[in-house]
Amino acid sequence: MKHNVLVPVSHPLGGIRSYIIYCFKRLHAEGARFTFLSEAGPAFESFKRDVADWQGTEFIDTPTAGGSKGAFFTIRKAIKERKFTLIHSQGLRSGTEAGAANYFRQIPHFVTLHDVIVPMNDIPGRFRTLKRLAISQLVRHASVLIPVSHDCAENHLEHFPAWRRGPARMETILNGIDIHRLDAADDVAYRSPGLRETFGVPIGAALGGFFGRFMPQKGFDLILDALAVLVRRGYGDRFRLLATKDPNGFLNETIRDATQNPDIGRMVYFIEPVSNVAPLLRQCDLLVMPSRWEACGLLAMEAMVLDTPVVGTDCLGLREVLRDTPSLVAEKENAESLAEKLIEFIEHPTTEAARNYVAEARNRFDVRRTTDALLELYRRYE
């Protein structure tokens, strides 16, 4: 395969970063060569180090000032000066910017949709209706739209119904996880200091893990409200929660105030962030994901592959991952429901069911399924 691919990505962080590292490594091995274009800054510099050993890979920094306008001009300049056979934008914003820059050149253009559109992260600023129309028109003229889940696909079609009429085709390619990377990290799980011993977790208490960011989407505040319910109902000594600190040191006032409550504070332990959560998941009795929305719940996939039970919500994106698994599912935005599921786990752990599901989880969530589908798509456009 001889593709020279421009990859605009606004912020190579989180799920987008994992997607590129997991999936594009295979495409690179099959002959694709990538030029990544992103805003200059620490996130892009860190990403560059992650893919530094990919032969022939190049990078273009967009100016930190100017926002989408700066990205548009940088992308337009790149496609005028270089012979790209394909553009593969990461995210709706990058897809819009690249769609505008590529409008008259018509290089084949893929747009992977990594997020969902909800009121809390809807299109900001003035002229929202015009912005929505511009996004709709520019992105629908891409070659292929690639949502990372069926929920993600339906969410975007709900907000941009014109996409149903094309000309872009929508091909959902389910996201996945690098099982071999998890296995490698898992090898150190039993050599790590024991979390229960380190924090003095009471004998018989279930240790839950929360490894999301402290932002509204991930619902850490809902866990704290659920912990208050556990205390009221006499389960305060039967559950503990482990959470990774935000790498930027962010802990909002609501979380800080709640954890200063002695009844809640003694139930929550904070540790430094890690690059791979496999060793932590192995030492937790369950993963707790109280998300308000997800595009595709990768962390839940990782937990199930490592036979760690999951208590999650029925929110967009996560419900699709938890469907037909042994996971316990609470109502989104409902701390009482979350507390009920935690109590259900405390009284009747799903440990054995999670262990029995591992073989199916490894098959269902393996990123090789994702990369196989992407490779087939790339070859169609050679």
Image: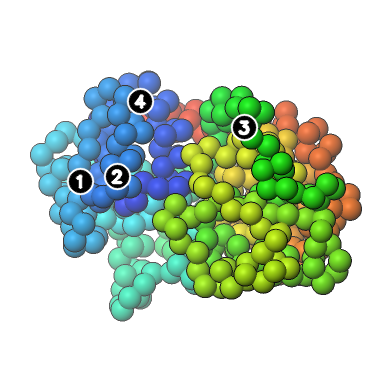
In front of the other: 206 or 5: 206
- Name the residue type under label 1: Asp
- Mark nearer the viewer, 2 or 3: 3
How many numbered marks does the figure carry?
4
Query: Residues under labels 4 and 3: Cα distance?
Result: 34 Å
Report crowding for label 1: few under 14, some 14 to 19, many 20 or more residues within 10 A (C-alpha). Answer: some
Tell me the SS state at disc 3.
Answer: loop
Tell me the SS state at disc 2.
Answer: helix
Report crowding for label 4: few under 14, some 14 to 19, many 20 or more residues within 10 A (C-alpha). Answer: some
Report crowding for label 2: few under 14, some 14 to 19, many 20 or more residues within 10 A (C-alpha). Answer: many
Query: Residues under labels 4 and 2: Cα distance?
Result: 19 Å
Label 1: which residue? 61
Q: Is residue 380 visible?
A: no
Q: Where does residue 38 sit, x and y in percent of width and height?
A: 26, 47
Label 4: which residue? 28
Q: Where does residue 353 sit, x and y in percent of width and height?
A: 82, 39
- Mark nearer the viewer, 4 or 2: 2
The answer to which of marks 4 and 1 sits earlier in the sequence is: 4
- Name the residue type under label 4: His
In the rendering, which numbered label is found on residue 44? 2
In the rendering, which numbered label is found on residue 192? 3
Please determine whether, in this image, residue 215 is positioned above or below residue 126: above
In front of the other: 46 or 34: 46
- Name the residue type under label 2: Phe
Residue pictured at 78% horizontal, 44% vertical: 326
Q: Circles 1 and 2: CB distance less than 8 Å?
A: yes
